[in-house]
Amino acid sequence: QVQLVESGGGLVQAGGSLRLSCAASRSIFSFNVMGWYRQAPGKQRELVTTITAGGITHYADSVKGRFNISRDNAKNTVYLQMNSLKPEDTGVYYCHLRIVTASLVDDYWGQGTQVTVSS
């Protein structure tokens, strides 16, 4: 089992920045991908960005050029730097970890952290 603990959410004005962090409870030696999803009120959870252990990243079109994901494998931590925030970025942000082995795929989720962007 792996626990994911998020921090860094809050209230910010449009155009501002926030940095989210997500720490895994243990080291992961299998192939894995960490990332962030978000869920706005009344909407489905959507992918924001992912990063592999090797540093390959993927971003949703809506955040390209504004958000940056990074990870520190020694600290088992992934970060999300969010710049030029817009009101439509408001939502609960969830950290996600997918571990892939030869025999199975395991998904883990953090508890979520609220991000509110005021106009």
Image (cartoon, rainbow, N blue to C red):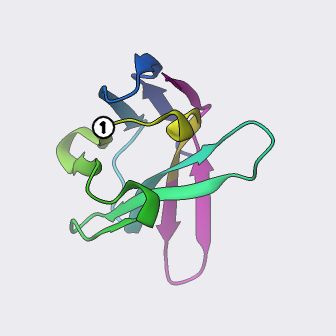
Q: Quadrant of residue 110?
A: top right
Classify residue 27 as left or right of residue 74.
right
Residue at point 81%, 41% (across, down): 42
Residue in the picture at 58% in, 45% down:
38
How many other residues sit within 10 Å of disc 1, few (<14), some (14-19) or many (≥20)?
some
Residue 41 coordinates in the image, percent (x, y): 75, 36
Q: Name the one closer to the observer, 53 or 118.
A: 118
Magenta residue check for 94: no
Task: Name the spot of residue 103 as percent of width and height, x first.
Answer: 58, 81
- Residue 4 lies, in percent from the top left, at 50, 37
Q: Nearer the viewer, residue 57 or 86?
A: 86
Q: Which residues are magenta?
A: 97-119
Quarter holding residue 53: bottom left
Instruction: Residue 43: give x, y in percent of width and height.
Output: 76, 48
Residue denoted by label 1? 84
Q: Is residue 29 visible?
A: yes
Which amino acid type is shown beneath numbered disc 1?
Ser
Is 110 covered by the magenta stretch? yes
Which residue appears farthest toward the top when viewing the image?
A: 11
In the displayed orientation, state which residue is furthest to the right.
42
Q: Residue furthest bottom?
A: 102
Camera-side residue: 97 or 68?
68
Q: Main secondary structure of the magenta part?
A: strand
Answer above or below: position of 95 versus 21.
Answer: below
Q: Residue at x 75, y 53 (%)?
A: 44
Q: Is residue 60 visible?
A: no
> As displayed, is residue 108 above or below residue 81?
below
Residue in the image at 29% along x and 49% along y: 66
Residue 105 image-quadrant placement:
bottom right
